[in-house]
Amino acid sequence: MDTVLVVDDEKNYLLVMETLLTGAGYEVLTADSGEEALEIIRRNDLDLVITDMKMPRLSGIELMEQIKQVYPDLPVIMMTAYGTVEKAVEAMKKGAFDYILKPFKNEEMLLTVAKALDLRHLLTENRRLKQDLEQRYRFENIIGNSKAMQSIFAMVEKVAQTRATVLISGESGTGKELIARAIHYRSPRSQGPFISVNCGALTETLLESELFGHEKGAFTHALTLRKGRFEMAEGGTLFLDEVAEMSPALQVKLLRVLQEMEFERVGGSKTIRVDVRVVAASNRELKTEVEAGNFREDLFYRLNVVHIQMPPLRQRVEDIPLLVMHFVHKYAEANQKEEVKLDPEVMKILLSYPWPGNVRELENVIERAVILCSQHTITVDDLPPQITEAPKIELDIDQVVPSHMPLPEALEKIEELMIRRALHQSGYVQVRAAELLGITKSLLQYKLKKYQITS
């Protein structure tokens, strides 16, 4: 919903304009002086200002000039009497979008407002596109020739053309947001905004306000009206990262939005309708969270219309060389270094490391190595200790199982070793270790007690 500020020292015009624009579906704020208008502009997210030109102390032109210094893309419409048309034309030369003669016809005013808001949306979108130019998430920017990644790319192509809600699961650092952006930019909504919010980074109160916005005075520090992420994502995609961290109360509100595509701002009673596609992500298995009573089952099914499971890096080792060379080139260019090469021993170590932090960890390691390397060659000395000193767990049957050991005892020994290896590869996250072993978490916990494995 677009927010319009009307400024006029004649209160009857403020009342007329508020009635007209509210009836047309706009959020309307009013001010009876230029000074008050500047204060409102500083405290609110506005889409348009309509101001009378002749006002005491601070004229409409002076007000516009101050607005343009701080918010050059915020359109301003001038209202003026017939005798000051020349001044209105002067205002347009200084940046006003248009002018309207008083008394005005309602249809003329609404048409001019609609045109100004179209310009506002276009400028906002152009700025967003420029900011995202380097972040266009095409498949050629998402590295992976493995069968697992090719399967994901094929699924993205199919689901991007639909309105379906998508749930992306996977460990931290596997590229869930990359895939969410790929879905958006390959969809009919690609010209709309891509808005993301990390549900695990905010308290319940802050997250509610972040998602749905709030009215002025809704709570202690709500000094201004603020639009939420759902409104900001109108016509585009909203990415809810770490959705499993959402409180039960917010889960109920999210479910309603997904069902009805409408909500109220915090502290407000006006229902706001939106057209938004939701893509959610979690590094925890939501089905497991449902079974544990931590996540609503009905919300899970609303989010899980299409499910994409991101594989951890250790399960697509064949992609590591491609990723390494991509990051080497990226950070060599960023640090203005000529061609940077890899010592063969470095790649050998990178391929043998389990990467509990996945692609994100690999990228950080390569960035560090590019910065530290000398003679344009990355050597083992340029890798961090956690990579070079990582314990190697290998299954050597001659060392682990003596030739005289009975089969049942030998099988238990091998089982214990496999569990320890899975724990190491998963960064000691039991749910992930159980997935690697192909068993349930409860069975893994039983085995941990059996073999007295604590770390």
Image: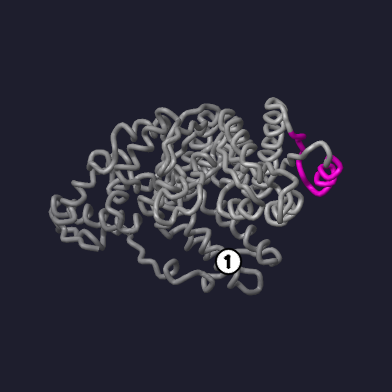
Q: Which residue sits at x=66%, y=46%?
A: 9
Q: Nearer the viewer, residue 37 or 189?
A: 37
Where is residue 293? Give x, y as percent: 23, 41
Q: Nearer the viewer, residue 430 or 406?
A: 430
Q: Which residue is mark 1?
A: 343
Where is residue 391? Give x, y as percent: 35, 66
Where is residue 253? Give x, y as percent: 36, 37
Q: Which residue sits at x=68%, y=48%?
A: 130
Which quadrant is the N terminus positioned in?
A: top right
Q: Nearer the viewer, residue 115 or 321?
A: 115
Q: Is residue 208 above or below residue 358?
A: above
Q: Which residue sits at x=70%, y=66%?
A: 336
Q: Which residues are magenta?
A: 85-102
Where is residue 213? Give x, y as percent: 46, 45
* Residue 100 sits inside the magenta stretch: yes
Q: Secondary structure at mark 1?
A: loop
Q: Which residue sits at x=58%, y=51%?
A: 40
Q: Nearer the viewer, residue 94 or 159?
A: 94
Residue 190 in sight from this viewpoint: no
User: Hey, what amino acid is under mark 1?
Assistant: Asp
Side of 30 where 409 appears, left or right: left
Side of 89 where 176 appears, left or right: left
Residue 422 in sight from this viewpoint: yes
Which quadrant is the C terminus positioned in?
A: bottom left
